[in-house]
Image: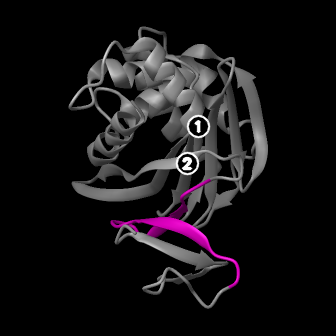
Amino acid sequence: MNSDTLLTTGNQETKATENGETNNEKTIAVEVERKTGISFPLELSDGKELKAVGVRKKNLLGFSIKIYSFGIYADNEILMHVLKSKMVKAEAKATKDMYSIVIDYPVGITVKIVIVFPNLTTSMVRNNFNETVGAAVKKLGGEKSDLTKRIMGETKDGIKLTLGSEIEITCLPGYVLETKVHGKVVNKFESELLCRACVYLYLGDDPLDKDAKEKFGMSLLSLI
């Protein structure tokens, strides 16, 4: 078991005993993002598996501020099928072409975001997506527009997102982008460019967390 992998029941985390058992009847395996201490389940309810964890930082007045921690999840079967159908041979290291396949094809990526910066509001998150996803859209050859603001749907701008608040962004088959806030779907619409841009943020040429991208790349190699 990875040193960062724990078993958790509810909000309580407990390390597994030597024989792999715990005193809790129901346990959930998680991975802890070290810089923030946020735990991410190794598997989502829909079966997607955790591939990498990381943290989104922003420079403010010369300081590097942690905004949110994130976990990147994927559907192994879909991911493996697409990779094998597009790749000629296995590589020793994840290549740009491998990442491009994940970015350009709807392979079932979910990014689970957990807020770590206090006193954020939905309008601030909306503006952040407009900035970061908008930049990704331009790098992919598209035009920056208000479309990025739809990621947060009709969620009221004044709602505060406290520490630990969760947002899930999923690129579903058919390039349908779905956003959940606290487990509730707040918007769902089709946009190939926006789906690609949301994945590009984490796996593109200038990812939000390079270590997370590299770890995701290692998971790709294990599939092929």
Three-letter amino acid code at disc 1? Answer: Asp
The image shows residue 1 at horizontal and vertical percentages of 40, 69
Instruction: State how many labels appear.
Output: 2
Asked if residue 153 is positioned above or below residue 117 in the image, the reply reads above
Q: Earlier in the sequence, mark 1 or mark 2?
A: 2
Distance from disc 1 to disc 2, alpha carbons, whole Å, reads 6 Å
Q: Quadrant of residue 89?
A: top left
Crowd tier of the residue under label 2, counting other residues whose Cα lies within 10 Å: few below 14, some 14–19, many 20 or above: some
In the foreground, 45 or 183: 45
Q: Which residue is mark 2?
A: 49
Membership of 29 in magenta stretch: yes
Three-letter amino acid code at disc 2? Answer: Glu
- Asked if the residues shown at circle 1 and circle 2 are in contact, with their CB atoms under 8 angstroms apart, the answer is yes
x 58%, y 28%: residue: 78
x 38%, y 69%: residue: 4
Element assignment for label 2: strand
Element assignment for label 1: loop
Q: Which residue is mark 1?
A: 75
x 75%, y 44%: residue: 155
